[in-house]
Image (cartoon, rainbow, N blue to C red):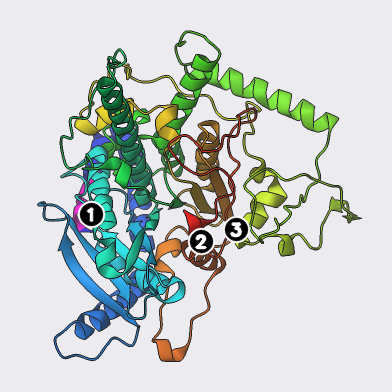
Amino acid sequence: MASLLLQALAGAQAEVAAQPDAQRRLAKARQLGAALAAELAAAAALAPAGVRALRVRAALAAAARPGAPPSPLGVALHAGLPYGPAPRQRLDVYVPTAAPPLAPVVFFTHGGIWATGERWHFGPLAVSLCQAAGAVVVVPSYTLYPRALAGEMAGEVLAALAWCAANAPRFGGDAARMTVLGHSAGGHLGALALMMLAVQQEQQAQEQQQAQQEQQGRQQLPAPGQQRCGRRGAWCAADPLALQPALFVGMSGVYDVAQHFEFESQRGVAAISTMARACGGAAAFDAVSPAVLLRRAAAAAEGAAAGQRPQPLPGRQQQQQQQQQQQQQQQQRHAAQPAPLWPQLPRDRGGGVAFDPAPRRRVGRAGGFEVDPGAAELTQLAGELIPLRSGLDRGSGGSGTALPPREPASAAGGGSASPAFGDAAVALARFTAAAAARLPPCVLMSSCGDALVPPHEAAGMARALEAAGVRAKHLIYDRPAHNDFVLGWAPRPLHMGAPALPLFARDLVSIVASRAELRSGGAPAGAADADAAPGGRAPVPLPLARL
């Protein structure tokens, strides 16, 4: 926390010094001082959650001593296990004392503006998932800014993920049922780590195919511009194809850094936030943005399918014009065929929830609004209700409503590494639609009560995933604040009974424990269904228990 405060003060000082005259410097200093005071007050309000986390940690540590009785929480803690040589390359493993055989695994990446966060902060979350979902929970730490930039952090997260998959059986976990869970900056890093893994998996598959062709006497040269990972650095998995997470869940994550920087600027906190600096500066924003990389991959695949030469990506002005045209076309379509305000999502025969946009029917009116009294009963997850009623569950559907890719700040086609990424930039620059096909299904959680990362950022990521052919679902809640997703958990001893969980927590437990059968369908319209999806994944439906 002290390091974060120093970085915030350094950013504020630089912003004040950049003002042209004394009057503006004074006004900027007042504005940033007020913003910093508000952020400190918000941090102080989290003190009760910190006390709760300390108590949980102390109880688990006491139970880990030789000869001590088992923890009344029903969880055993294996703390500080190394997954790499750096000081912060450590992880905690929480194991239910009555874990079922082949328990689900949750790999949680914490947030903290890329500059703060400790493993023990999230003990209540981990213990609650152990108790309610019977899951083995792994919480790693990683090197923070200013000692590392976003690419290095994502590489460390991938190294910890590989460790988790290899060692899950030691703790009774099933690596085939692993959920990669990330919050805020952790959602950003978790998404980047999975994209880096997908690039390595695609490369390994191509290498294996090439080896088979060589054995058959039909040697094929690598495609022009294609580069090998070389298995360099901790961010390269030893056997990428053996590492297959079942699901990604992002809670209030940042997926488009430039978009979130604009939001921070509107809030007046961009100068004291460490995000821009941790992500390598404005020139590297798009290179570290999962949503931008997905949109570029989808645009390149669409151009290749149409037999067109790759065209330069549109600039900011062209993007705005395209968005206005798309909005006008969408308004005309809605005017011609108005959709009901409160649509329905029917259950399938297995009781699961479909990813696919559901057929709509008109319902009764009351007070000028179209209402469906049974809409809530038709949803399996609480976070589905707001997207259903607002129409956000429709996705892009291949209608062209997804945002166009931004013009890259520098040519990424050559695979040159940026200062923010090092070798990891080479992998992400090669992210293609073929690599996107290897990503696991994605569930994005956001809240209307989140003042730090608004829901429209997750909605943009969901559209980008769908445009790239990745199965995605966006859940929206009405009340949780930003940190409630990870700090609002309060586990109790088992003899006191299970605590009441908020709606988002119930949904997360259902997803992790495979109690919610999530069905896919986010692929763009016109995409042909195959017996097996690219990358060897099963077609729809996709019950989590079978992934």
- Confirm or deny contact between disc 1 and disc 2 (CB under 8 A): no
Mark earlier in primary sequence (2, 3):
3
Question: For the residues marked 1 and 2, what is the alpha-carbon distance in whole angstroms?
Answer: 23 Å
Q: Magenta span covers which residues?
A: 2-8
> Which residue is under mark 2?
511
Amino acid type at mark 3: Gly
Bin the neighbour count of mark 1 within 10 Å (Cα to Cα): few under 14, some 14-19, many 20 and up: some
Where does the image place residue 542, in percent across and percent down from the top left?
55, 50
Specify the amino acid type for callout 1. Answer: Trp
- Disc with the residue nearer the chain's start (1 vs 3): 1
Q: Earlier in the sequence, mark 1 or mark 2?
A: 1
| Residue on which disc 1 sits | 163
Query: Dots 1 and 3: beta carbons under 8 Å?
Result: no
Residue at point 17% right, 63% down? 81
Q: Is residue 68 left or right of residue 450?
A: left
> What element does badge 3 sit on?
helix
Residue 272 seen from this side: no
Q: How dense is the environment of label 3, judged by Cα within 10 Å: few (below 14), some, or many (20 and up)? A: many
Residue 100 in picture, x, y percent from top left: 39, 74
Q: Name which quarter of the figure residue 98 lies in.
A: bottom left
**What secondary structure is marked by label 1?**
helix
Q: CA distance from mark 1 to mark 3?
A: 32 Å
In this rendering, the label closer to the viewer, 1 or 3: 1
Q: Residue furthest top?
A: 309
> Would you place residue 148 above or below residue 478 in this image?
above
The residue drawn where x is 79% and y is 45% is 360
Q: Position of residue 202 (x, y in %)?
A: 34, 32
Q: In this view of the protein, which residue sits in the foreground, 455 or 31?
A: 455
Name the residue that disc number 3 marks: 383
Q: Main secondary structure of the magenta part?
A: helix
